[in-house]
Image (cartoon, coloured by chain):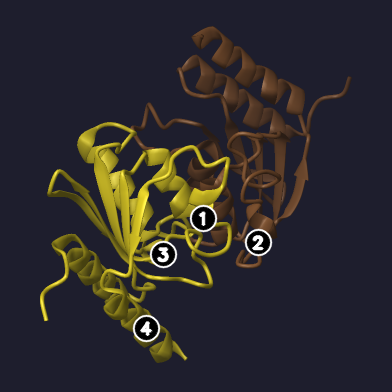
Chain colours: A yellow, B brown
Amino acid sequence: MFPLPPPMRAALDAAAKAAQAGEVPVGAVVVRGGDVIAVAANAPRALRDPTAHAEMLAIRRAAAVLERDRLDDCDLWVTLEPCAMCAGAIAHARIVRLYYGASDAKGGAVEHGPRFFGQPTCHHRPEVYSGIGEREASDLLRGFFAARR
Amino acid sequence: MFPLPPPMRAALDAAAKAAQAGEVPVGAVVVRGGDVIAVAANAPRALRDPTAHAEMLAIRRAAAVLERDRLDDCDLWVTLEPCAMCAGAIAHARIVRLYYGASDAKGGAVEHGPRFFGQPTCHHRPEVYSGIGEREASDLLRGFFAARR
């Protein structure tokens, strides 16, 4: 078995750390020209911020690093299908490519629910690729919720 | 003519300040039990943050003030129909009531596009009221974009 692409490896490692911290395990990484610009783990409880999903934190950190509000030369890697909030942020940030791991039938807004990037009102559609490291991503989530039951 | 409800007045004043700062004029206010908890103006350029819509900033500030990630006893007042990102954040924050001014046929996600709160996958639906101060809200936006042409 060969390793996962490095950005997804880093996103999964961030997700595992989120689980250890008692947060729903999701991780995200912003990449620009082969360089990792930002890594983030889901942290709404620790940060007391309902918007602090991994994707949002990674996008905000990358924008801070690059000192601009458009990440139109960046890709986002995330372990779970983004929700509507995060899909909207991906469009606002003009992310070029979105790579995600597991699908999320409950909260996902890319291939489920609002299918945001397919809406006529969506002003920016990234290229979307999924299923990268999906087993590890969903195992992390399943283990987290099983332990809390 | 009677005045607008105070939270929408404060949101419109924040929107006007955003325009003066060169940002698309949208303002938002979080209210809890009659008290204004947070006021914010749209600021993605100034903050170099693609997620820095008025609603997001108001929700994040209110969560910071209340030191919790659920605003389940708070209402949000905003001058413009929220986009998908902000509608998602409103659901995550468990906002009780959403009051907005003008409709946004291009980027709105409440009565347009994904109609997020009507999706079966939406896990929290606020009560929604609109059309409060809509003329002033849309005049601010029209004036802003007309001046930039």
Q: Amino acid at mark 3?
A: Glu
Residue count near mark 2 (Cα–Cα under 10 Å), binned few <14, some 14–19, many ≥20: some
Q: Mark 1 or mark 4: which comes first in sequence? A: 1
Q: Is residue A118 left or right of residue B95?
A: left
Residue identified by numbered label 4: A144
Q: Is residue B64 visible?
A: no
Q: What's under tag 1, amino acid-wise?
A: Ala
**What amino acid does circle 4 point to?**
Phe
Q: CA distance from mark 1 to mark 4?
A: 22 Å
Chain to which mark 1 belongs: A
Kind of residue at disc 2 = Gln
Chain at tag 2:
B
Quadrant of the image occupied by residue B15:
top right
> Gap in Å between the C-alphas at discs 3 and 1?
10 Å
- What residue sits right under mark 3 in the picture? A81
Residue B132, percent from left and from top? 77, 34
> In this rendering, is residue B25 above or below A32?
above
Judging from the image, what secondary structure is the residue with disc 3 in?
Answer: loop
Q: Are marks 4 and 3 in contact (CB under 8 Å)?
A: no
Q: Residue at x 24, y 72 (%)?
A: A17
Residue at the spot of label 1: A84
Q: Nearer the viewer, mark 1 or mark 4?
A: 1
| Residue holding disc 2 | B119
Within-10-Å neighbours for mark 1: few <14, some 14–19, many 20+ = many
**Which of pointers 4 and 3 lies earlier in the amino acid sequence?**
3
Q: Chain of mark 3?
A: A
Are the two marked residues, 4 and 2, in contact with CB atoms closer than 8 angstroms?
Answer: no
Image height check: is A113 above or below B144? below
Indicate the quadrant where residue B133 lies: top right
